[in-house]
Amino acid sequence: MAGAFTNIVFGFLRCYLLLAVAGAAAAGRVGGYGQTQLATFVWAGQGLLAVVLLWGWTELAERIRTGDVVGDLLRPVAPVSSYLATDLGRAGYALLARFLPVVLVGPMVFAVYLPHRWPTVPLFAVSVLLAVVICFGCRYLVNATAYWLHDIRGSMILWTLLSGLGAGLYFPLRFLPTAVLVPLWLFTPLPSILQAPLDVLVERDPAPVQFGLVGIQAVWAAVILLACRVVQRRAERRLVVQGG
């Protein structure tokens, strides 16, 4: 309840700020978004923040620090698959407990944009699922640095700084110049965590581009999960060499 209330408060602040920017722009549009699209972008983004769980997960790092991770390695299910299944269950609960309350409050105060194309809603659902997988993989890799560093505070601070900015949490990434936006989208998974599903929802682009954004997410999800498995195997080898 406290988390949903906090997201709603920040939703008001972000929405008023972005609407002020759009109001000062020509024709009330900025970065290709209309005012109603920006309102939907903000409120859906505030709800998705808890679904993808951008920050705050340190369970794996803590189990590595205490040595309890050895118990994970004895289970018949690989740690990456086990933690991913748990995270998907958590995301499903967050959709009901954290996403719905936030997106229901926004339209009571602001005029929001509703999708006009029928494929948008199922495409948005797929996009959110891929965003959850990508964000889980990134958090897993950050936690896995504990195998080598033992203390992940530095890694976590770096992730917190980069993820909020690169995922489009603070402002839509379409506000950035193309020379910055395209490399950020193609060479990092960060825009696929929040920016991509939100752009799909507000129909910022034509339908083929919407499908392209989800396709990029699918590629990043596969790459990130593969990276998690490679890192986990190297970490297990390190534990064996050290007699763990």
Image: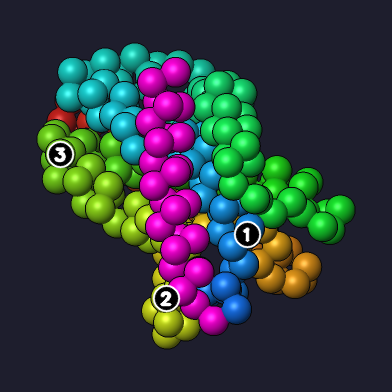
Give the residue number, with chain letter if any, for mark 2: 176
Question: Circle 3: is it few (<14), some (14-19), or many (20+) Cα within 10 Å?
Answer: some
Q: Amino acid at mark 2?
A: Leu
Give whichever of discs 3 and 2 has the lower sequence position.
3
Question: Circle 1: is it few (<14), some (14-19), or many (20+) Cα within 10 Å?
Answer: many
Q: Residue at x 70, y 62 (%)?
A: 203
Give the residue number, with chain letter if any, for mark 1: 37
> How far across and how far down the image is residue 27, in percent?
60, 78
Q: Residue at x 40, y 57 (%)?
A: 17
Q: Residue at x 57, y 27 (%)?
A: 101
* 176 drawn magenta: no
> How far across and how far down the image is residue 160, in percent?
27, 47
> How far across and how far down the image is residue 240, in percent?
24, 30
Q: Quadrant of residue 8?
A: top left
Residue 141 as seen in the image, left or right of residue 210: left
Q: Secondary structure at mark 2?
A: loop
Q: Secondary structure at mark 1?
A: helix
- Distance between the alpha carbons at the discs numbered 1 and 3: 37 Å
Please report the bounds of the magenta region as a residue range: 1-26
Label at residue 153: 3
Q: Is residue 239 above or below residue 228?
A: above
Q: Is residue 193 visible?
A: no
Q: Is residue 172 visible?
A: yes
Q: Is residue 30 above or below residue 126?
A: below
Q: Amino acid at mark 3?
A: Arg
Q: Amino acid at mark 1?
A: Gln
Give whichever of discs 1 and 3 has the lower sequence position.
1
Q: Nearer the viewer, residue 164 or 137?
A: 164
Q: Secondary structure at mark 3?
A: helix
User: Which residue is the extreme one toward the right?
Assistant: 118
Q: Nearer the viewer, residue 178 or 19?
A: 19
